[in-house]
Image (tube, helix red, strand yellow):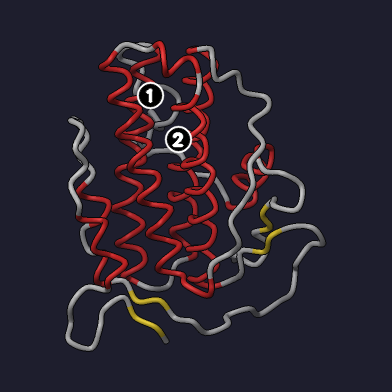
Amino acid sequence: MSKLLNSGGDEAEFAKPLYVPIKRRSFFMYAGATAGATALLLSSCNDDDDDTSMPGMVDVGSGDTGVLNYAYALEQLEAAFYTMVKAGDYYKNAVAAEKAILDDIAAHEIIHREFFKAALSTSAIKPLEVDFSSINFGDRTAVLGAAKTFEDLGVAAYNGAGQYISSADYLTLAGKIVSVEARHAALIRDLISNGSFVNDVVSPTTGLELSKSPVDVANAANMYLKDGFKINVGNIK
């Protein structure tokens, strides 16, 4: 078993960059996503019970490691999306305040991606290759619509995966990261239409945000992953 704490109780070296301040201003501060990172323990054991691997797909695995790889895959997708956003004409021509918001979100997603990659270490799935050919990165409506899709999907994925996490430390970490992802989703929705930040994602009867199963999330995410890099989450159960 590998740990994110060294023998002296200090944080692992890879976790330290998570605490470097993000220089651009943001009203949805990032700190909550990384608090408690040093408490995360990662088992390097193979937890696979069944083999439901699919040819040509990336199997995220099973148990807590599978859930972390599932989250890592989604963070890869989001980080790649915002990297493309910042290279596109919409971003280049956007007003300064909107650019600053997108810069913050992009920075958060990259930190999330790198955190999971380092935490999983040799248990991490391979880097995924994306296909965003259906998105017009020169059009504001198209970019923000895609951002809404990715952010809503990420929040629903964390909400739906909680039941499969056995480690209290992992569950705490997931709760902290999903709170940041929810702020992203709310902000993107507000950019699209002011005051719409909770429309259709919070149940009017329970007051709880909607969740999705790993299979449903994977089906949606795979639309934006190249062949050979689509994820199989069949062992998460």
Q: Secondary structure at mark 2?
A: helix
Q: At 45% across and 39% down in the image, what residue appears?
A: 210
Assign the N terminus to one quadrant of the image. Answer: bottom left
Assign the C terminus to one quadrant of the image. Answer: bottom right
Q: At 75% across and 53% down in the image, what residue appears?
A: 228
Q: Nearer the viewer, residue 162 or 147?
A: 147
Q: Position of residue 135 (x, y in %)?
A: 61, 23
Q: Amino acid at mark 2?
A: Glu
Q: Earlier in the sequence, mark 1 or mark 2?
A: 2
Which mark is drawn over residue 151? Answer: 2
In the picture provided, is 95 more to the left or to the right than 214? left
Which mark is drawn over residue 188? Answer: 1
Question: In which quarter of the view is residue 13 placed?
Answer: bottom left
Label 1 with label 2: CB-CB less than 8 Å: yes
Q: Secondary structure at mark 1?
A: helix
Q: At 35% across and 33% down in the image, what residue appears?
A: 184
- C-alpha gap between disc 1 and disc 2: 8 Å
Q: Position of residue 187 (x, y in %)?
A: 32, 25
